[in-house]
Amino acid sequence: MKMISIEDLVRWAYLEELPKVAPGRSGPTGVGNGWGAVGSYVQLLAVIDLNPYGVVPNLADLGEPHPDAVAVHAAIADLDHLVVDDFDPEDLVSDMPHLGDLLQVALAEAIDRVLVRDRDGDLVVKGGVGVLVRTRALLGGAVAPVGDAPRLVPMLGANGRQVWRRRVLMACRWDGDGNEIGWETREVDVPVVSGRVPLDAFPVEVLRPDPTGLIAERLRWMAWHAGLEALETMLTDRLVDHRLVLPDRPWRPWAGDRVADRRVHDVVGWEGVVGAAGCPGRTMKMRRRVA
């Protein structure tokens, strides 16, 4: 048996084996959504004939795909039934300084970019875990989202000077006669005249660089990592000519997590390895959606 990592196995399946199937041939459906073909046409201004596995066929090398590649495709399709069972959002910013509410706002926005509640109230990855795993394989893998930690800097106005604001109480609800019955506190800009700042004003600060995109990419990394871990478990007894070795990807590269030693995967699983189920390194848990 050939020993191979799960990332290399997925890349081999979608780049070398599954393109051997011609378009129009009956078979399993590709991992994707109903707008996939429309999106391809918009980007390329051409109709792309995908094969039943959702990839562009290699017309110069048509034939039967390896059974292990077919097993990979079937398992990846099952990944879209996974929902996020548990994760700690603070793991996404564990290497960043405590910057108060601004960092929490960026964290909440980043989570909204990647995760969404389905109609059953379960937290799921937008687009599906299977699409995320397959796309990253086709693109050659994933770059560890380390990045630079943000810092607080003054917010500058159009004139290049510090922006100042004050908090004021403003009406937000009225009764049928137009009388104010509800108020809320809002922040409004304060003009600075001759360099004089009102006593109740405060300087506005922002985070630079904006960490929202970096945090969102870290969350995708964790979802991708959890998806690969689930895929490894699914394929343990389905492969014919390949045997999986331990991954060399840490759960949180931005936090200095250790990378597990490479060794052969067996039916028992990744016991005693950082990043495996039940081990301290694991930062996201997923479960299969209840039918």
Image (spheres, rainbow, N blue to C red):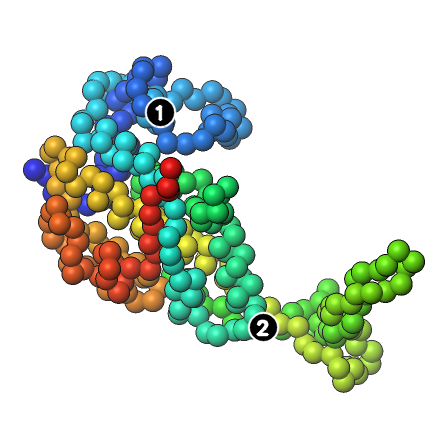
When the figure is inspected, residue 69 is found, relative to residue 93, above or below; the finding is above
CA–CA distance between discs 2 and 1? 50 Å
Measuring from the top left, give residue 177's x and y in whole percent: 92, 58
Instruction: Read off the residue under disc 1.
Output: 29
Secondary structure, mark 1, is: loop
Amino acid, disc 2: Val
Instruction: Read off the residue under disc 2.
Output: 153
Q: Is residue 145 visible?
A: no
When the figure is inspected, residue 199 is found, relative to residue 43, above or below; the finding is below
Q: Residue at x 30, y 19 (%)?
A: 27
Amino acid, disc 1: Thr
The residue lying furthest to the right in this view is 177
Q: Nearer the viewer, mark 2 or mark 1?
A: 1
Measuring from the top left, give residue 276's x and y in whole percent: 23, 56
Whichever of labels 2 and 1 marks the residue nearer the N terminus, that label is 1
Direction from residue 157 to residue 245 in the image, left or right: left
Image quarter for residue 65?
Answer: top left
Image quarter for residue 72?
Answer: top left
